[in-house]
Amino acid sequence: MLIFPAIDIIDGKPVRLFKGDFSTAEQVASDALETARGFVSAGADWIHMVDLDGSVQKKRVNSQTFVDVANQTSLKVEIGGGIRTMNDIDYYANNGISRVILGSVALKNPELVREAVGEFGELIAVGIDARDGFVATEGWTEGSSTHFIDLAKQMEEMGVKTIIYTDISKDGTLSGPNVEQLTELNSAVSCDVTASGGVTNISDIITLRDSGLYGAICGKSIYKGTLDLKEAIEVCR
């Protein structure tokens, strides 16, 4: 299982949120590039980054930060937030980004996903974020009546190979991942499934690993010291 240390960005600074609430934003490091280099030292191969400003403004806002990490470290960068057009995807694809995550548009404009997969293949991942099992969009500010499994199956049919699933109620809480929903999703589709939200300690990592998941995103647990990134990477090798 791959471990994805995470950096969420607001105004160019690394932050973490509690259950996706922007009013809870807490700066967790002084510099994204410096933090990313620390992840390299711990043995990370990938990094998960989110343009939180972009997710609300529906456009690329902090893109230079992500490109800098991709081009000035050895990390493979997956980036989500504010990606709404083929031009956005093309920009990241041509600036060293290894994976582009489509979130809100997967529900609101699925034809863009189809077109993107057709052109960029496995560069494209879909992020499915849910509250009580139902998909939320636009930086988690809008709900829907679509169940996360239904959206995942639709994305699988379009050729999406990677799904990142977040239970919003778990995100930033250090209360453990929603293993039940993640296992359900992993059984329902053939896509690689990455767990996001709630990862707290090495026991959570081992549980997710033993559940057969593709990856786990770790954010607040690293910054708060409840999870040692190097240990997490080593137990999943």
Image (tube, grey):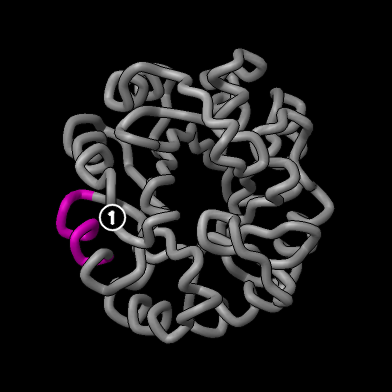
In screen coordinates, is 69 left or right of 9?
left
On screen, residue 150 above or below 40: below
Q: Position of residue 100 (x, y in %)?
A: 36, 58
Which residue, given by chain and number where applicable, does mark 1 sit on?
Answer: 60
Is residue 93 inside the magenta stretch?
Answer: yes
On screen, residue 80 above or below 137: above
The residue depicted at 20 percent of the width and 42 percent of the height is 64
Element at badge 1? loop
The residue depicted at 37 percent of the width and 57 percent of the height is 57
On screen, residue 39 above or below 187: above
Q: Position of residue 65 (x, y in %)?
A: 25, 37
The kind of secondary structure the magenta stretch mainly shows is helix
Please indicate, yes or no, whether residue 210 appears anywhere in the rendered image. no
The residue depicted at 45 percent of the width and 63 percent of the height is 125
Write the start and end of the magenta stretch as one range.
Answer: 89-96
Q: Position of residue 159 (x, y in %)?
A: 48, 79
Amino acid type at circle 1 is Arg
Q: Position of residue 78 (x, y in %)?
A: 38, 49
Residue at the farthest right position: 180
In screen coordinates, is 16 left or right of 221?
left
Is residue 225 inside the magenta stretch?
Answer: no
Please indicate, yes or no, whether residue 142 appears anywhere in the rendered image. yes
In screen coordinates, is 22 left or right of 94?
right
The residue depicted at 20 percent of the width and 49 percent of the height is 96
Residue at the farthest top position: 225
Out of 28 and 70, give the one closest to the viewer.
28
Residue at the farthest front position: 23
